[in-house]
Image: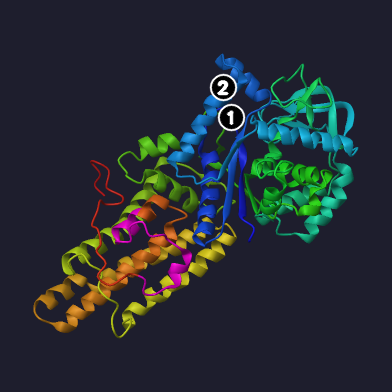
Amino acid sequence: MAKPFYITTPLYYVNASPHIGHSYTTVAADCLARFHRLRGDEVFLLTGTDEHGQKIEQAAAASGRTPQVFADEVVERFKALWGLLAISYDDFIRTTQERHVRVVQACLKTLEARGQLRHATYQGWYCTPCETFWTDAELTEGAACPSCQRAVERVAEDGWSLPLRPAQEWLRGFLRERPDWIQPAARFNEVQSLLERPLPEALCITRPRQRVNWGIPVPFSEGHVTYVWFDALLNYISAPGFGTEPARFARLWPADVHLIGKDILRHHAVYWPIILHALGLSDHEMPRMIVAHGWWKIGEQKMSKSRGNIVDPSVVVRELLHGQPYAADAYRYFLLREVPFGQDGAFSEEAILGRLQADLANDLGNLVHRTLSMLERYTAGKIPPAPAVGCAVEDEPIRQQALALPAQLDTALQELRFSQALEAVFRLVGDANRYIESQAPWQLAKAARGSDAASARRLEGVLWLLAETLRVVAIALEPFMPKVSAAMWRQLGFGSAPRRLSDLTVWPGCPAQQRVELAEVLFPKPEGSSR
């Protein structure tokens, strides 16, 4: 049996409600998962929440709740958003769940038994918002956190550390053998540059209870809890069953893609492989790829809770896109189309409304509604049979473009180039709209009513080609806009029949005389709009 395609998002920290950055990673992961399911692959999409640490403890205290009650409430907001955005995750792991706690404690025991840990006093700088330690070499006194630019605190803590430098040469060698392991290339170069300098001596993987009580207890040291980043990274092996379900773990591991934001690249591309190496898991294959995407900005500023410039996806979908029956899909489309994955993007209301009007309403929605309306008007709402003599010369470019689409999608999505994949789909949509104008079915219909048999045959050929094009577009959009895809599929008369990538290579694929359904406009004009 083939190994399932295993995709992960980071575990999202529950100190506050989800924002556009969380949704970006998760929508991208869902798109990739849906594409592989469309190919017929078995998929395991993992997401979840990171619920321990000093920041959670402080946020809970400020709200007058216990950390567990506080985390429970925020987790429900994440789950509600994933439901709104049609995220098809296969598992949602929480770091407070017993199944995760058991694995973390077992890993700590393994590292201690293998002599991989050392007990010492750590001195350095700590950024509570990032829950990240910085050494003196990485940060000078008075400087802000290199990651979030917020204030750091000088700490001296007794605890347990995992040495990093002994594994540095091994990690360098691993990256030399796997130059495609970190994407995009700029992020790979960033890690390579980091490894050219000596790493910090060790990664402190515990916190003293007297400073942080909200964490997984260290099984061999009563006065310590597990450092939140060590705890969180282990979700990638705890969820598939490391140490608890050996057969399941052997089938799922390694992860095929870790999708992350670029601000946590060091944790995933340096600490995580060294942790796996120390546990002996590098012999079982490392994760196959880490993809670090860019940030969403408001103007020139990165979004952050401290700046108060966070975009709430629920507000965008329910309020900004109010009245759109497929608002969540429009939001998904904007995230995946607006910027190449890996680069920074700028969010504005004007940008998302512009995509809604130009790409979705004027191009896609217009093509669907015009085609179905003409089928209703000219062929009694039924898809005509394929022309007996095959495609006309003027039809061939559209047919060739449609048949080329599956390979274009496969190439782009294997490399996580979501924007490029959507460009290919919407190139076909745009060409189909221009095809309608050039072929003028309304004129063919007028001639056909005058007993022009050739015009009648040509009218059927044009409408047949448009129906086939909509079928191809509906299938191709499934990973990106699943509800729009399903609506198009239903309106074409396919009902609940499955959509498969292999069907894109079948031409023709619409059954002759299949009844179409002229339903609601996919992307209606807002009330009072002149567009």
In the picture, measured across the screen, residue 374 lies left or right of residue 192, that is: left
**Residue at 51% over, 39% down:** 20
How many labels were placed on the picture? 2
Kind of residue at disc 1 = Val
Viewer-proximal residue, 224 or 259? 224
Q: Residue at 62% x, 46% y: name it.
A: 8
Can residue 342 be seen at all in this image of the molecule?
yes
Q: Quadrant of the N terminus?
A: bottom right
Location of residue 146 with respect to 501 vertically, above or below: above
Q: Is residue 526 above or below residue 408?
A: above
Q: Amino acid at mark 2?
A: Phe
Q: Disc 1 marks which residue?
A: 14
Q: Measured along the vertical axis of the image, is residue 183 above or below residue 68? A: below
Helix, strand or loop under label 2 = helix
Q: CA distance from mark 1 to mark 2?
A: 8 Å
Q: Are marks 1 and 2 in contact (CB under 8 Å)?
A: yes
Label 1: element kind: loop
Write the residue at 23% across / 75% down. Answer: 460
How many neighbours does mark 1 have within 10 angstroms: few (below 14), some (14-19), or many (20 or more)?
Answer: many
Residue 300 appears in the picture as rendered:
no
**Where residue 189 sits: x, y (%)?**
73, 53
**Mark 1 or mark 2: which comes first in sequence?**
1
Q: Is residue 495 magenta?
A: yes
Q: Which residues are magenta?
A: 487-509
Q: Residue furthest bottom?
A: 389
Of 283 and 519, the residue lying toward us: 283
Where in the figure is residue 79, as x and y percent of width and height? 50, 35
Location of residue 439 (image quadrant) = bottom left
Q: Residues within 10 Å of mark 2 (few under 14, many from 20)?
A: many
Residue, x 26% and y 58% (percent of image)?
369
Which residue matches tag 2?
Answer: 70
